[in-house]
Amino acid sequence: MVKLKYVERPKLSLLEKLLFLDFIKGLKVTFKNLIRKTITTKYPYEKLTPPKRFRGTHAHRVKDGNEPPSFSVLEKFMDINTGESRCVACYMCQQACPMPSLFRIEAVQLPNGKKKVVRFDMNLLNCLYCGLCVDACPVDCLIMTDIYETAKYQRESCVIHMDDMSERGKDFDRRRLKEPDRIWIDDQERIKLWGQIKWS
Amino acid sequence: MEMLATVIGVVIKSVIFIVGMFLAAAYLTLIERKFAGHVQQRPGPLHVGYHGLLQPIADALKVLTKEDLVPNNVDKVLFYLASLMAFVPAIMILAVVPFGDPFTIFGIEIKPFITDLNIGLILALAFGSISIYGVIFAGWASNSKYPMIGGLRKAAVLIGYEVALGFAMVGPIMMAGSFSLREIVQAQEGFFGAFIWYQPIAFIVILFAILAETGRTPFDVQEAEAELVSGYNTEYSGMKFGLFPLAEWYIGTFVLSAIAVILFFGGWKGPHIFGVLSPFIWFFLKVFMMFMFFLWVHWTLPRYRVDQITEIAWKVMLPLSLLNIFITAIIIIVKG
Protein backbone atom coordinates (compact mmCIF):
# COMPACT_ATOMS: atom_id res chain seq x y z
CA MET A 1 0.00 0.00 0.00
CA VAL A 2 1.45 3.28 -1.05
CA LYS A 3 1.15 6.07 1.43
CA LEU A 4 0.04 9.28 -0.21
CA LYS A 5 0.95 12.61 1.24
CA TYR A 6 -1.32 15.46 0.36
CA VAL A 7 0.21 18.90 0.23
CA GLU A 8 -1.99 21.97 0.35
CA ARG A 9 -1.18 24.53 -2.28
CA PRO A 10 -0.35 27.88 -0.75
CA LYS A 11 -3.38 30.13 -0.88
CA LEU A 12 -3.07 33.50 -2.59
CA SER A 13 -3.65 36.54 -0.46
CA LEU A 14 -6.42 38.96 -1.42
CA LEU A 15 -3.95 41.54 -2.70
CA GLU A 16 -2.29 38.96 -4.91
CA LYS A 17 -5.68 37.91 -6.27
CA LEU A 18 -6.83 41.45 -7.00
CA LEU A 19 -3.69 42.82 -8.60
CA PHE A 20 -2.55 39.65 -10.46
CA LEU A 21 0.80 39.85 -8.67
CA ASP A 22 1.80 36.37 -9.82
CA PHE A 23 1.13 37.29 -13.44
CA ILE A 24 3.20 40.43 -13.04
CA LYS A 25 6.08 38.43 -11.59
CA GLY A 26 5.97 36.13 -14.60
CA LEU A 27 5.77 39.03 -17.03
CA LYS A 28 8.80 40.54 -15.32
CA VAL A 29 10.81 37.37 -15.87
CA THR A 30 9.97 37.21 -19.57
CA PHE A 31 10.76 40.88 -20.03
CA LYS A 32 14.14 40.43 -18.36
CA ASN A 33 14.90 37.60 -20.76
CA LEU A 34 13.63 39.64 -23.70
CA ILE A 35 16.27 42.31 -23.25
CA ARG A 36 19.09 39.88 -22.50
CA LYS A 37 21.61 38.97 -25.16
CA THR A 38 20.87 35.84 -27.14
CA ILE A 39 23.06 32.85 -26.33
CA THR A 40 22.71 30.94 -29.57
CA THR A 41 25.40 30.08 -32.11
CA LYS A 42 24.56 30.87 -35.73
CA TYR A 43 25.63 27.39 -36.69
CA PRO A 44 26.62 27.18 -40.31
CA TYR A 45 28.40 30.53 -39.98
CA GLU A 46 29.79 30.19 -36.47
CA LYS A 47 31.11 26.90 -35.21
CA LEU A 48 31.91 26.14 -31.61
CA THR A 49 35.08 24.24 -30.82
CA PRO A 50 33.93 21.25 -28.79
CA PRO A 51 35.63 20.28 -25.55
CA LYS A 52 38.84 18.28 -25.83
CA ARG A 53 37.08 15.23 -24.41
CA PHE A 54 34.37 15.42 -27.08
CA ARG A 55 33.53 12.07 -28.62
CA GLY A 56 33.59 12.77 -32.32
CA THR A 57 34.94 10.92 -35.34
CA HIS A 58 37.63 8.36 -34.52
CA ALA A 59 41.31 8.80 -35.27
CA HIS A 60 44.60 6.97 -34.80
CA ARG A 61 47.52 8.42 -32.93
CA VAL A 62 50.79 7.90 -34.82
CA LYS A 63 54.20 6.74 -33.65
CA ASP A 64 55.83 10.02 -32.65
CA GLY A 65 57.77 9.38 -29.47
CA ASN A 66 54.97 10.07 -27.01
CA GLU A 67 53.87 6.47 -26.76
CA PRO A 68 52.90 4.89 -23.41
CA PRO A 69 55.26 2.23 -21.99
CA SER A 70 53.00 -0.57 -23.17
CA PHE A 71 53.79 0.37 -26.74
CA SER A 72 57.54 0.01 -26.32
CA VAL A 73 56.96 -3.57 -25.13
CA LEU A 74 55.00 -4.42 -28.25
CA GLU A 75 57.03 -2.28 -30.62
CA LYS A 76 59.73 -4.84 -31.33
CA PHE A 77 57.17 -7.28 -32.72
CA MET A 78 55.61 -4.68 -35.00
CA ASP A 79 56.54 -3.20 -38.36
CA ILE A 80 55.68 0.46 -37.69
CA ASN A 81 57.66 3.44 -38.97
CA THR A 82 57.60 6.85 -37.33
CA GLY A 83 54.58 8.79 -38.52
CA GLU A 84 52.46 5.71 -39.09
CA SER A 85 49.51 4.56 -37.03
CA ARG A 86 50.65 2.94 -33.81
CA CYS A 87 47.87 0.32 -33.96
CA VAL A 88 49.09 -3.12 -32.93
CA ALA A 89 45.94 -5.00 -34.08
CA CYS A 90 45.18 -6.38 -30.62
CA TYR A 91 41.41 -6.36 -31.32
CA MET A 92 40.74 -4.89 -27.86
CA CYS A 93 38.59 -2.17 -29.40
CA GLN A 94 36.50 -4.74 -31.20
CA GLN A 95 36.14 -6.74 -27.98
CA ALA A 96 34.95 -3.69 -26.09
CA CYS A 97 32.59 -2.50 -28.78
CA PRO A 98 28.85 -3.04 -28.24
CA MET A 99 28.54 -3.50 -32.02
CA PRO A 100 31.71 -5.47 -32.84
CA SER A 101 30.88 -5.95 -36.51
CA LEU A 102 31.59 -2.33 -37.29
CA PHE A 103 35.34 -3.06 -37.07
CA ARG A 104 37.28 -4.69 -39.90
CA ILE A 105 40.83 -5.24 -38.63
CA GLU A 106 43.36 -7.35 -40.48
CA ALA A 107 47.06 -7.91 -39.81
CA VAL A 108 49.64 -10.02 -41.66
CA GLN A 109 53.00 -11.48 -40.74
CA LEU A 110 55.83 -10.15 -42.84
CA PRO A 111 58.67 -12.47 -44.03
CA ASN A 112 60.95 -11.03 -41.30
CA GLY A 113 58.47 -12.22 -38.67
CA LYS A 114 57.06 -8.84 -37.76
CA LYS A 115 53.37 -8.03 -37.65
CA LYS A 116 51.88 -5.39 -39.91
CA VAL A 117 48.38 -3.96 -39.68
CA VAL A 118 47.01 -3.82 -43.22
CA ARG A 119 43.45 -2.87 -42.54
CA PHE A 120 41.62 -0.96 -39.86
CA ASP A 121 38.16 0.07 -41.07
CA MET A 122 35.31 1.32 -38.98
CA ASN A 123 31.74 1.59 -40.25
CA LEU A 124 30.63 4.71 -38.39
CA LEU A 125 27.03 4.21 -39.48
CA ASN A 126 26.80 1.56 -36.77
CA CYS A 127 28.84 3.46 -34.21
CA LEU A 128 27.11 4.93 -31.20
CA TYR A 129 30.12 6.98 -30.09
CA CYS A 130 30.22 5.48 -26.61
CA GLY A 131 34.02 5.64 -26.43
CA LEU A 132 34.53 2.13 -25.02
CA CYS A 133 36.99 1.33 -27.82
CA VAL A 134 39.08 4.33 -26.84
CA ASP A 135 39.20 3.17 -23.22
CA ALA A 136 40.17 -0.32 -24.30
CA CYS A 137 43.11 0.66 -26.51
CA PRO A 138 46.30 -0.48 -24.72
CA VAL A 139 48.70 1.70 -26.73
CA ASP A 140 46.68 4.94 -26.67
CA CYS A 141 46.23 4.65 -30.42
CA LEU A 142 42.51 4.87 -31.06
CA ILE A 143 41.16 8.24 -29.95
CA MET A 144 38.08 10.31 -30.60
CA THR A 145 38.49 13.78 -32.06
CA ASP A 146 36.42 16.92 -31.89
CA ILE A 147 35.02 16.51 -35.42
CA TYR A 148 31.25 16.36 -35.21
CA GLU A 149 30.12 16.99 -38.79
CA THR A 150 29.86 13.37 -39.91
CA ALA A 151 27.16 13.66 -42.57
CA LYS A 152 28.12 12.20 -45.93
CA TYR A 153 26.50 11.89 -49.34
CA GLN A 154 27.18 8.17 -49.74
CA ARG A 155 26.84 5.44 -47.18
CA GLU A 156 30.24 4.09 -48.29
CA SER A 157 31.85 7.38 -47.29
CA CYS A 158 30.90 6.73 -43.67
CA VAL A 159 33.46 3.90 -43.46
CA ILE A 160 36.76 5.33 -42.25
CA HIS A 161 40.12 3.75 -43.02
CA MET A 162 43.47 3.58 -41.29
CA ASP A 163 45.21 6.20 -43.45
CA ASP A 164 42.69 8.97 -42.98
CA MET A 165 42.40 8.05 -39.30
CA SER A 166 46.13 8.57 -38.74
CA GLU A 167 45.98 11.83 -40.71
CA ARG A 168 43.10 12.96 -38.50
CA GLY A 169 45.00 11.90 -35.41
CA LYS A 170 48.05 13.92 -36.44
CA ASP A 171 45.86 16.92 -37.10
CA PHE A 172 44.03 16.56 -33.78
CA ASP A 173 47.24 16.22 -31.77
CA ARG A 174 48.75 19.21 -33.53
CA ARG A 175 45.71 21.29 -32.63
CA ARG A 176 44.76 20.14 -29.18
CA LEU A 177 47.37 17.89 -27.55
CA LYS A 178 48.81 20.59 -25.31
CA GLU A 179 45.46 22.10 -24.43
CA PRO A 180 44.41 22.00 -20.75
CA ASP A 181 41.40 19.85 -19.97
CA ARG A 182 38.51 22.27 -19.81
CA ILE A 183 34.95 22.23 -21.05
CA TRP A 184 34.71 25.13 -23.48
CA ILE A 185 37.33 27.49 -24.79
CA ASP A 186 35.40 30.44 -23.44
CA ASP A 187 34.62 28.92 -20.04
CA GLN A 188 35.21 32.19 -18.22
CA GLU A 189 32.66 34.08 -20.37
CA ARG A 190 30.17 31.27 -20.02
CA ILE A 191 30.47 31.39 -16.24
CA LYS A 192 29.62 35.07 -16.43
CA LEU A 193 26.62 34.26 -18.61
CA TRP A 194 25.25 31.24 -16.78
CA GLY A 195 26.64 31.60 -13.27
CA GLN A 196 28.55 28.94 -11.44
CA ILE A 197 27.46 26.23 -9.05
CA LYS A 198 28.83 26.66 -5.54
CA TRP A 199 30.25 23.35 -4.33
CA SER A 200 29.91 22.82 -0.59
CA MET B 1 -23.85 58.56 -60.13
CA GLU B 2 -23.25 59.40 -56.51
CA MET B 3 -24.26 55.87 -55.64
CA LEU B 4 -21.67 54.50 -58.06
CA ALA B 5 -18.97 56.74 -56.60
CA THR B 6 -19.80 55.52 -53.11
CA VAL B 7 -19.69 51.88 -54.21
CA ILE B 8 -16.38 52.35 -55.98
CA GLY B 9 -14.97 54.17 -52.98
CA VAL B 10 -16.05 51.42 -50.60
CA VAL B 11 -14.67 48.72 -52.89
CA ILE B 12 -11.31 50.47 -53.17
CA LYS B 13 -11.16 50.99 -49.43
CA SER B 14 -12.10 47.34 -48.79
CA VAL B 15 -9.39 46.13 -51.13
CA ILE B 16 -6.86 48.39 -49.43
CA PHE B 17 -7.96 47.17 -46.00
CA ILE B 18 -7.87 43.48 -46.95
CA VAL B 19 -4.52 43.65 -48.73
CA GLY B 20 -3.09 45.81 -45.96
CA MET B 21 -4.36 43.39 -43.33
CA PHE B 22 -2.85 40.44 -45.21
CA LEU B 23 0.55 42.12 -45.36
CA ALA B 24 0.27 43.29 -41.77
CA ALA B 25 -0.66 39.79 -40.63
CA ALA B 26 2.31 38.36 -42.53
CA TYR B 27 4.65 40.74 -40.76
CA LEU B 28 2.91 40.20 -37.41
CA THR B 29 4.06 36.58 -37.72
CA LEU B 30 7.61 37.86 -38.01
CA ILE B 31 7.15 40.11 -34.98
CA GLU B 32 5.74 37.23 -32.99
CA ARG B 33 8.58 34.91 -33.98
CA LYS B 34 11.18 37.51 -33.14
CA PHE B 35 9.50 38.23 -29.81
CA ALA B 36 9.15 34.57 -28.93
CA GLY B 37 12.75 33.99 -29.88
CA HIS B 38 14.14 36.76 -27.76
CA VAL B 39 12.03 35.75 -24.77
CA GLN B 40 13.76 32.37 -25.02
CA GLN B 41 17.14 34.01 -25.64
CA ARG B 42 17.39 32.99 -29.27
CA PRO B 43 17.33 35.46 -32.16
CA GLY B 44 14.41 34.08 -34.20
CA PRO B 45 14.38 34.26 -38.03
CA LEU B 46 17.72 35.67 -39.11
CA HIS B 47 18.87 34.59 -42.53
CA VAL B 48 16.13 35.43 -45.05
CA GLY B 49 16.74 39.09 -45.63
CA TYR B 50 18.13 41.47 -43.05
CA HIS B 51 17.29 39.92 -39.66
CA GLY B 52 14.62 37.79 -41.34
CA LEU B 53 12.70 40.65 -42.92
CA LEU B 54 11.75 38.55 -45.96
CA GLN B 55 10.85 35.50 -43.87
CA PRO B 56 7.05 36.08 -44.09
CA ILE B 57 7.27 36.10 -47.89
CA ALA B 58 9.27 32.88 -47.87
CA ASP B 59 6.73 31.36 -45.49
CA ALA B 60 3.84 32.43 -47.68
CA LEU B 61 5.49 30.91 -50.76
CA LYS B 62 6.15 27.71 -48.87
CA VAL B 63 2.61 27.41 -47.53
CA LEU B 64 1.07 28.20 -50.92
CA THR B 65 3.14 25.63 -52.79
CA LYS B 66 2.57 22.83 -50.29
CA GLU B 67 0.45 19.89 -51.31
CA ASP B 68 -3.15 20.54 -50.34
CA LEU B 69 -4.07 17.24 -48.76
CA VAL B 70 -7.70 16.39 -47.99
CA PRO B 71 -8.13 13.15 -46.03
CA ASN B 72 -10.65 10.63 -47.38
CA ASN B 73 -13.09 10.48 -44.53
CA VAL B 74 -13.60 14.16 -43.84
CA ASP B 75 -16.86 16.02 -44.30
CA LYS B 76 -15.76 17.75 -47.49
CA VAL B 77 -18.10 20.74 -47.40
CA LEU B 78 -17.43 21.67 -43.79
CA PHE B 79 -13.74 20.90 -44.18
CA TYR B 80 -13.37 23.46 -46.95
CA LEU B 81 -15.76 25.87 -45.28
CA ALA B 82 -14.03 25.82 -41.91
CA SER B 83 -10.84 27.63 -42.88
CA LEU B 84 -12.88 30.30 -44.67
CA MET B 85 -15.27 30.53 -41.74
CA ALA B 86 -12.34 31.24 -39.47
CA PHE B 87 -10.67 33.71 -41.80
CA VAL B 88 -13.37 35.80 -43.48
CA PRO B 89 -15.32 36.97 -40.41
CA ALA B 90 -12.07 37.81 -38.63
CA ILE B 91 -11.09 40.16 -41.43
CA MET B 92 -14.66 41.49 -41.76
CA ILE B 93 -14.48 43.06 -38.31
CA LEU B 94 -12.26 45.63 -40.00
CA ALA B 95 -15.34 46.96 -41.79
CA VAL B 96 -16.49 48.74 -38.66
CA VAL B 97 -13.11 49.72 -37.21
CA PRO B 98 -12.47 53.44 -37.74
CA PHE B 99 -8.84 54.47 -38.21
CA GLY B 100 -9.36 58.21 -37.91
CA ASP B 101 -11.58 61.20 -38.54
CA PRO B 102 -12.58 62.05 -42.11
CA PHE B 103 -10.01 64.32 -43.75
CA THR B 104 -9.62 66.06 -47.10
CA ILE B 105 -6.83 65.54 -49.62
CA PHE B 106 -6.91 67.31 -53.06
CA GLY B 107 -10.49 68.34 -52.47
CA ILE B 108 -11.74 64.78 -51.93
CA GLU B 109 -13.11 63.89 -48.54
CA ILE B 110 -11.62 60.57 -47.44
CA LYS B 111 -13.17 58.59 -44.63
CA PRO B 112 -10.60 56.20 -43.14
CA PHE B 113 -13.24 53.61 -42.31
CA ILE B 114 -15.48 51.45 -44.48
CA THR B 115 -18.79 51.93 -42.71
CA ASP B 116 -19.84 53.82 -39.61
CA LEU B 117 -22.66 51.60 -38.43
CA ASN B 118 -24.65 52.61 -35.41
CA ILE B 119 -24.36 48.99 -34.21
CA GLY B 120 -20.68 48.64 -35.08
CA LEU B 121 -19.65 47.08 -31.80
CA ILE B 122 -22.36 44.44 -31.95
CA LEU B 123 -21.34 43.64 -35.50
CA ALA B 124 -17.73 43.20 -34.38
CA LEU B 125 -18.85 40.91 -31.56
CA ALA B 126 -21.00 38.88 -33.94
CA PHE B 127 -18.23 38.43 -36.51
CA GLY B 128 -15.83 37.49 -33.75
CA SER B 129 -18.22 34.75 -32.66
CA ILE B 130 -18.81 33.50 -36.21
CA SER B 131 -15.06 33.22 -36.59
CA ILE B 132 -15.08 30.66 -33.78
CA TYR B 133 -17.40 28.46 -35.86
CA GLY B 134 -14.45 27.89 -38.16
CA VAL B 135 -12.60 26.22 -35.32
CA ILE B 136 -15.58 24.13 -34.29
CA PHE B 137 -16.36 23.11 -37.90
CA ALA B 138 -12.73 22.18 -38.45
CA GLY B 139 -12.83 20.02 -35.35
CA TRP B 140 -16.01 18.28 -36.44
CA ALA B 141 -15.29 17.93 -40.15
CA SER B 142 -11.80 16.47 -39.72
CA ASN B 143 -13.30 13.17 -38.48
CA SER B 144 -10.33 12.59 -36.20
CA LYS B 145 -10.04 12.51 -32.44
CA TYR B 146 -7.61 15.34 -31.72
CA PRO B 147 -9.34 17.97 -33.87
CA MET B 148 -12.63 16.83 -32.39
CA ILE B 149 -11.39 17.37 -28.84
CA GLY B 150 -9.92 20.72 -29.83
CA GLY B 151 -13.13 21.91 -31.43
CA LEU B 152 -15.25 20.80 -28.49
CA ARG B 153 -12.90 22.52 -26.05
CA LYS B 154 -13.19 25.74 -28.01
CA ALA B 155 -16.97 25.40 -27.98
CA ALA B 156 -16.92 24.91 -24.21
CA VAL B 157 -14.71 27.93 -23.69
CA LEU B 158 -16.75 30.01 -26.13
CA ILE B 159 -19.88 29.72 -23.98
CA GLY B 160 -17.97 31.08 -21.01
CA TYR B 161 -16.14 34.10 -22.36
CA GLU B 162 -18.71 35.37 -24.88
CA VAL B 163 -21.14 36.29 -22.11
CA ALA B 164 -18.50 38.09 -20.07
CA LEU B 165 -17.19 39.87 -23.18
CA GLY B 166 -20.64 41.13 -24.13
CA PHE B 167 -21.40 42.41 -20.65
CA ALA B 168 -17.96 44.00 -20.23
CA MET B 169 -18.45 46.03 -23.40
CA VAL B 170 -21.63 47.49 -21.95
CA GLY B 171 -19.63 49.75 -19.59
CA PRO B 172 -17.90 51.87 -22.29
CA ILE B 173 -21.09 51.79 -24.36
CA MET B 174 -23.06 53.28 -21.46
CA MET B 175 -20.47 56.00 -20.95
CA ALA B 176 -20.39 56.88 -24.65
CA GLY B 177 -24.11 56.43 -25.16
CA SER B 178 -23.59 54.76 -28.54
CA PHE B 179 -22.72 51.47 -30.22
CA SER B 180 -20.88 53.23 -33.01
CA LEU B 181 -17.13 52.82 -32.61
CA ARG B 182 -16.54 56.30 -34.02
CA GLU B 183 -18.82 57.92 -31.47
CA ILE B 184 -17.22 55.92 -28.66
CA VAL B 185 -13.86 57.38 -29.66
CA GLN B 186 -15.30 60.86 -29.88
CA ALA B 187 -16.72 60.52 -26.36
CA GLN B 188 -13.16 60.16 -24.99
CA GLU B 189 -11.59 63.59 -24.79
CA GLY B 190 -8.02 64.15 -23.67
CA PHE B 191 -5.67 61.95 -21.70
CA PHE B 192 -7.94 61.53 -18.68
CA GLY B 193 -10.99 61.15 -20.85
CA ALA B 194 -9.92 57.69 -21.98
CA PHE B 195 -12.31 55.06 -20.63
CA ILE B 196 -9.50 53.00 -19.13
CA TRP B 197 -9.52 55.36 -16.13
CA TYR B 198 -13.24 54.79 -15.55
CA GLN B 199 -13.60 51.18 -16.61
CA PRO B 200 -10.56 49.24 -15.36
CA ILE B 201 -12.66 46.20 -14.44
CA ALA B 202 -14.24 46.05 -17.88
CA PHE B 203 -10.77 46.33 -19.38
CA ILE B 204 -9.50 43.32 -17.44
CA VAL B 205 -12.55 41.28 -18.41
CA ILE B 206 -12.06 42.22 -22.07
CA LEU B 207 -8.38 41.30 -21.92
CA PHE B 208 -9.42 37.90 -20.61
CA ALA B 209 -12.07 37.52 -23.30
CA ILE B 210 -9.75 38.55 -26.14
CA LEU B 211 -7.10 36.07 -25.00
CA ALA B 212 -9.76 33.37 -24.89
CA GLU B 213 -11.32 34.32 -28.23
CA THR B 214 -8.06 34.43 -30.15
CA GLY B 215 -6.81 31.26 -28.47
CA ARG B 216 -3.60 32.79 -27.19
CA THR B 217 -1.65 30.93 -24.64
CA PRO B 218 -3.18 31.02 -21.24
CA PHE B 219 -6.36 29.87 -22.99
CA ASP B 220 -5.09 28.04 -26.07
CA VAL B 221 -6.97 24.87 -25.15
CA GLN B 222 -8.15 24.29 -28.70
CA GLU B 223 -4.71 23.59 -30.09
CA ALA B 224 -2.80 22.66 -26.93
CA GLU B 225 0.16 21.22 -28.80
CA ALA B 226 1.38 19.22 -25.83
CA GLU B 227 -1.88 17.33 -25.45
CA LEU B 228 -3.69 17.42 -28.81
CA VAL B 229 -1.29 17.08 -31.70
CA SER B 230 -2.09 20.44 -33.17
CA GLY B 231 -5.68 20.70 -32.05
CA TYR B 232 -8.42 21.56 -34.48
CA ASN B 233 -6.12 22.02 -37.49
CA THR B 234 -4.29 18.69 -37.24
CA GLU B 235 -5.78 17.33 -40.48
CA TYR B 236 -5.22 20.49 -42.50
CA SER B 237 -2.35 21.22 -44.82
CA GLY B 238 -1.20 23.88 -47.24
CA MET B 239 -2.89 27.26 -47.25
CA LYS B 240 -6.05 25.86 -45.64
CA PHE B 241 -3.87 25.25 -42.60
CA GLY B 242 -2.10 28.58 -42.97
CA LEU B 243 -5.36 30.51 -42.77
CA PHE B 244 -6.14 29.26 -39.26
CA PRO B 245 -3.22 30.74 -37.32
CA LEU B 246 -3.34 33.79 -39.60
CA ALA B 247 -6.99 34.35 -38.73
CA GLU B 248 -6.84 33.48 -35.06
CA TRP B 249 -3.45 34.56 -33.82
CA TYR B 250 -2.74 37.54 -36.02
CA ILE B 251 -5.79 39.08 -37.68
CA GLY B 252 -8.07 38.18 -34.77
CA THR B 253 -5.70 39.50 -32.15
CA PHE B 254 -4.90 42.60 -34.17
CA VAL B 255 -8.51 43.51 -34.86
CA LEU B 256 -9.66 42.81 -31.34
CA SER B 257 -6.72 44.87 -30.04
CA ALA B 258 -7.99 47.65 -32.27
CA ILE B 259 -11.44 47.33 -30.72
CA ALA B 260 -9.99 47.32 -27.20
CA VAL B 261 -7.95 50.41 -28.08
CA ILE B 262 -11.06 52.14 -29.39
CA LEU B 263 -13.07 51.22 -26.31
CA PHE B 264 -10.49 52.10 -23.68
CA PHE B 265 -7.57 54.12 -25.04
CA GLY B 266 -9.30 56.77 -27.11
CA GLY B 267 -8.70 55.25 -30.55
CA TRP B 268 -6.80 57.64 -32.80
CA LYS B 269 -6.84 60.53 -30.30
CA GLY B 270 -3.46 61.87 -29.27
CA PRO B 271 -1.32 65.00 -29.44
CA HIS B 272 -0.98 66.33 -33.01
CA ILE B 273 2.76 65.95 -33.22
CA PHE B 274 3.01 63.98 -36.47
CA GLY B 275 1.06 66.42 -38.65
CA VAL B 276 -1.63 65.03 -40.96
CA LEU B 277 -0.75 61.40 -40.24
CA SER B 278 -1.02 61.92 -36.49
CA PRO B 279 -4.31 60.00 -35.95
CA PHE B 280 -3.11 56.98 -37.91
CA ILE B 281 0.21 56.90 -36.16
CA TRP B 282 -1.39 57.15 -32.74
CA PHE B 283 -3.93 54.49 -33.58
CA PHE B 284 -1.44 52.00 -34.95
CA LEU B 285 0.99 52.72 -32.13
CA LYS B 286 -1.68 51.95 -29.56
CA VAL B 287 -2.86 48.82 -31.38
CA PHE B 288 0.73 47.68 -31.75
CA MET B 289 1.39 48.17 -28.03
CA MET B 290 -1.76 46.21 -27.26
CA PHE B 291 -0.70 43.44 -29.65
CA MET B 292 2.73 43.31 -28.05
CA PHE B 293 1.08 43.02 -24.66
CA PHE B 294 -0.86 39.99 -25.87
CA LEU B 295 2.37 38.49 -27.21
CA TRP B 296 4.02 39.16 -23.88
CA VAL B 297 1.25 37.38 -21.99
CA HIS B 298 1.28 34.57 -24.55
CA TRP B 299 4.95 33.82 -24.08
CA THR B 300 4.79 34.10 -20.29
CA LEU B 301 1.87 32.13 -18.93
CA PRO B 302 1.24 28.38 -18.93
CA ARG B 303 -2.00 26.88 -20.24
CA TYR B 304 -5.19 26.75 -18.20
CA ARG B 305 -7.50 23.75 -18.19
CA VAL B 306 -10.91 24.03 -19.85
CA ASP B 307 -12.73 23.72 -16.54
CA GLN B 308 -10.54 26.44 -15.05
CA ILE B 309 -11.28 28.78 -17.94
CA THR B 310 -15.03 28.24 -17.76
CA GLU B 311 -14.85 28.60 -13.99
CA ILE B 312 -13.03 31.93 -14.26
CA ALA B 313 -15.40 33.07 -16.97
CA TRP B 314 -18.61 32.24 -15.14
CA LYS B 315 -17.60 32.73 -11.51
CA VAL B 316 -15.22 35.69 -11.72
CA MET B 317 -15.44 37.57 -14.99
CA LEU B 318 -19.23 37.53 -15.45
CA PRO B 319 -20.00 38.84 -11.91
CA LEU B 320 -17.22 41.41 -12.31
CA SER B 321 -18.66 42.72 -15.56
CA LEU B 322 -22.18 42.80 -14.09
CA LEU B 323 -20.81 44.69 -11.08
CA ASN B 324 -19.09 47.07 -13.47
CA ILE B 325 -22.38 47.75 -15.28
CA PHE B 326 -24.13 48.33 -11.95
CA ILE B 327 -21.52 50.80 -10.67
CA THR B 328 -21.35 52.61 -14.01
CA ALA B 329 -25.12 52.92 -14.13
CA ILE B 330 -25.30 54.35 -10.57
CA ILE B 331 -22.53 56.87 -11.30
CA ILE B 332 -24.20 57.94 -14.54
CA ILE B 333 -27.53 58.40 -12.74
CA VAL B 334 -25.95 60.33 -9.85
CA LYS B 335 -23.87 62.58 -12.11
CA GLY B 336 -26.71 62.98 -14.54
Image (tube, rainbow, N blue to C red):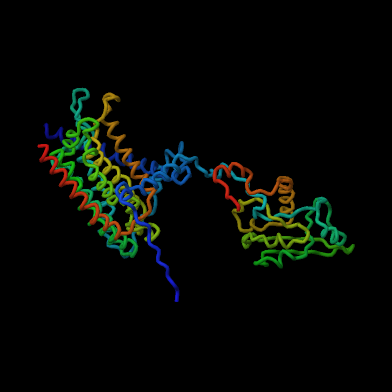
Q: Is residue B233 left or right of residue B131?
A: right
Q: Give how far across and how far down residue B108 sits, in percent.
A: 18, 26
Question: Which residue appears farthest toward the right when viewing the image?
Answer: A112
Question: Which residue appears farthest toward the bottom when viewing the image?
Answer: A1
Residue B88's place in the image compared with B198, above or below, is below
The quadrant in which residue A91 appears is bottom right
The quadrant in which residue A158 appears is bottom right
Task: Decide which of B283, A60 is in the foreground and name it.
Answer: B283
The quadrant in which residue B21 appears is top left
Q: Give how far across and how far down residue B195 sits, in percent.
A: 21, 38
Quadrant that contains the N terminus of chain A: bottom left
The tally of labels here is: 0
| Residue at 39%, 52% in the rendered image | B66
Q: Give how far across and how far down residue B329 sits, in percent.
A: 13, 44
Whether residue B166 appears in this view of the structure is no
Whether residue B155 appears in this view of the structure is yes
| Residue at 12%, 34% in the rendered image | B3
Task: Decide which of A97, A164 is in the foreground and name it.
Answer: A97
Residue B148's place in the image compared with B66, above or below, is below
Q: Give how far across and how far down residue A149 sits, in percent.
A: 61, 51
Q: Is residue A69 left or right of residue B177?
A: right
